[in-house]
Image (spheres, grey):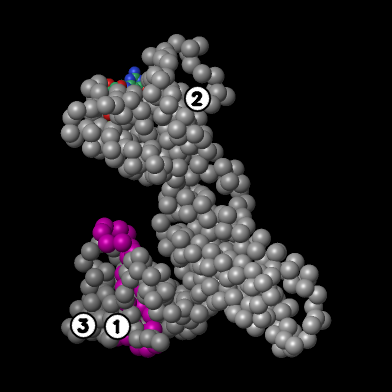
Amino acid sequence: MLTDVIAAVATPPGRSAIALIRVSGRGCHAVAAKVLQPFNPQPYRRARRAKAVDPRTGEILDQVLYTVFAAPASYTGEDMVEIGTHGGLLVPAGVLAALFAAGARQAAPGEFTRRAVLNGKLDLIQAEAVADVIDAATPAQRRAALRQLDRGLSRRIEQLREQVLELEALVSYDIDFPEEDSGPVPPQRVEAAATALLEALRGLLATAADGEKLREGALVVIAGRPNAGKSSLFNALLGSERAIVTEIPGTTRDAIEAMASCGGFPFRLVDTAGLRESEDRVEKLGIEVSRRYLRAADLVLFCVEAGRDLEPEEKRFVEELGDRVLIVRTKADLVPIDELPPPEAAELWVSALSGTGLDRLRDRLAERAFSGLAGGGDLAELVTRERHRLALERALEEVESFVRARREGIEAAVAATHLRAAVAALEELIGVVSTEDILDRVFSTFCVGK
Ligand SMILES: Nc1nc2c(ncn2[C@@H]2O[C@H](COP(=O)(O)OP(=O)(O)OP(=O)(O)O)[C@@H](O)[C@H]2O)c(=O)[nH]1
Ligand SMILES: [Mg+2]
């Protein structure tokens, strides 16, 4: 395992009061000692002032605050030094270059967290949660990510692993004494344990749809006839003038996507070209793009001006979408209030112009897209990544194969190999055993300094 000294700026580049440089690896205290004057490592974990100096020229680069950590009590589990410099572009880069001159090398993306995993400070799910905490754009995402960082999901996976191991133990007598007719464990007990395990696996897998939606944002497509007020609604929900609005029908010709937070939950909002028969080549292509988005949408906001009836083809469109559609009456400011649907109606009304009805729409979006999660302060463990889901699906398939093999009277030792494979899938998920390529995949999206 590599333990050489790595260094990187952990804060984003640009003007800021301070920047933080991380240094980690065996011998990193000696590297820091060549740059920081004076350098007093002990007592550890105490912030101290020093000058940062270029070891080649003796030039003073900055006045810094540094903290020394000794293995294994650090983020990476190695010896570490954290150096707070002034921000900006030149100063942090200069101190980093001085550290390189003193013997450190540039850290690869995610290399600090990768070392934390290899040293047992974090498991693989927690490492992913580190990235999710940083990327969280809504309170619900932060809640879920912090919970994973706290090992919520890891513990669930460990429990499942324990359950498989117990099942393995139950059938071990049959494996050791295959000639005996019946072992000391009644078959019903094995069956009950297998059923409970299957239920637990399926229960956790059932959270994947909501979990992945929570991490990536629910896809909400704004659709409707030309001029229905789609782009105006899109802008109003975003709180910025992203899409062009004009009184000319057919203004929007391409899909525009943006992230928005509604009711504390993340949404990928898409404004689309108005749906109509068109001879215009560009508009036709835009409508085709709209249809593609509509197929993938978690929810469709179907915009219809307030105070008019739905055309037959609009009714058909709504019916086709079934429970994925929410009808929104737009331009409500142009209609007397008693002609608008009451607040509890399935149809909502909004005015992008005055902003009325937007909050109700946001709440409704959160309820509809995240019904399983909304309102719950204490959400159950969630499977939030494809990687988690695929591993759990593999474990589930193996346990199902085990059950089938037993039913078909296949030799116990052979049937039990499925349980071994299920354990392996769960261990890979949590990172008990992690091969290089799994680590590469997990850390490929990390940035330098993480
Ligand atoms: N009074 C009023 N006018 C609105 C409201 N929302 C949109 N409009 C007007 O309706 C017209 C069309 O609005 P857009 O948001 O461009 O409609 P669209 O559905 O995106 O239209 P296309 O992109 O052409 O399909 C513009 O003149 C808007 O100013 C509203 O809440 N109140
Ligand atoms: Mg538009």
Q: Is residue 289 above or below residue 398?
A: above
Tell me the CA gap for discs 2 and 1.
62 Å
Q: Is residue 76 visible?
A: no
Give the quarter of the image for residue 88.
bottom left
Q: Position of residue 439 (x, y in %)?
A: 41, 74
Label ID, residue 58: 3
Q: Which residue is mark 2?
A: 347
Q: Nearer the viewer, residue 268 or 45?
A: 268
- Foreground disc of the pair 3, 1: 1
Residue 291 drawn above or below residue 61: above
Which region shows up in magenta?
7-35
Residue on which disc 1 sits: 104
Q: Residue furthest front?
A: 408
Q: Residues within 10 Å of mark 3 (few under 14, many from 20)?
A: few
- Relative side of 153 to 184, left or right: left
| Quadrant assignment, res 191 | bottom right
